[in-house]
């Protein structure tokens, strides 16, 4: 007996029905409720227009003992839609892959992202790896239509890739 399949006609010997299992993917969001007085810490109305604003908001990362790599998902008016902790690394490194950064950015319908990570040493000077991942993430963002506005390294002060003309 011949049956029509997704890949064309196929000869089968059994007349027993076959079962096909398909996986479906659904976007799942988690809403975090903060039960303390955060004031205007992350007000959805604040437009982020300078690296200093981002540093002031996320300066607490300078006190962390591990490296955190975070992507801020922004709408068309540079207001934060979501904060994605992409990676938590060790004392001096964090593994980041463009697939993981843009997976959540696409789900949140971000128009742009601001990347930031901390250097527990306090020195915000970017490493060679920081420069390379920034280039890769910018290239991937250009491909999927999500602009990388800046990459900010937080230490005792900050280093902004856009202020220095690296992005």
Image (cartoon, grey):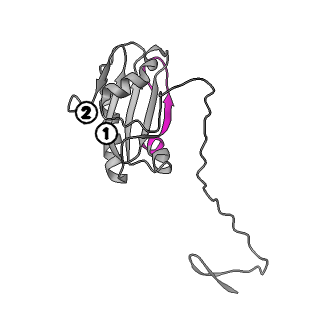
Count every numbered label the image shows and give the total: 2
**CA separation in Å, label 1 and label 2:** 7 Å
Foreground of the two, 21 or 7: 21
Residue behind mark 1: 149
Q: Measuring 44% from the left and 45% from the top, which residue is drawn there?
A: 102
Residue extent of the magenta highlight: 82-101
* Callout 1 touching callout 2 (CB < 8 Å): yes
Looking at the image, the residue that sits furthest to the right is 16
Q: Position of residue 146 (x, y in %)?
A: 36, 48
Q: Measuring 39% from the left and 12% from the top, which residue is drawn there?
A: 121
Label 2: how many Cα within 10 Å (few below 14, some 14–19, many 20+): some
Residue 154 colored in magenta in the image: no
Q: Position of residue 130 (x, y in %)?
A: 34, 29
Is the residue 2 above or below the residue 92 in the image? Answer: below
Q: In which quarter of the image is the C terminus?
A: top left
State which tag comes first along the sequence, 1 or 2: 1
Q: Is residue 109 left or right of residue 131?
A: right
Q: In this view, does 21 lie to the left or right of 109?
A: right
* Label 2: which secondary element: loop
What is the quadrant of residue 61 in the picture? top left
């Amino acid at each position: 007996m011949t049956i029509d399949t997704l890949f064309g006609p196929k000869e089968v010997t059994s007349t027993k029905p076959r079962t096909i299992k398909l996986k479906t993917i659904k976007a799942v969001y988690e809403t975090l409720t903060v039960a303390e007085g955060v004031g205007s810490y992350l007000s959805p109305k604040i437009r982020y227009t300078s690296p200093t604003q981002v540093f002031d908001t996320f300066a607490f990362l300078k006190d962390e003992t591990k490296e955190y790599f975070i992507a801020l998902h922004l709408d068309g008016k540079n207001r934060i839609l979501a904060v994605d902790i992409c990676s938590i690394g060790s004392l001096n490194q964090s593994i980041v892959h463009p697939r993981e950064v843009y997976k959540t950015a696409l789900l949140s319908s971000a128009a742009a992202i601001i990347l930031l990570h901390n250097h527990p040493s306090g020195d915000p000077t970017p490493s060679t790896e920081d420069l390379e991942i920034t280039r890769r993430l910018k290239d991937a963002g250009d491909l999927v239509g999500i602009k990388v506005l800046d990459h900010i390294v937080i230490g005792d002060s900050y280093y902004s890739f856009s202020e220095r003309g690296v992005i």
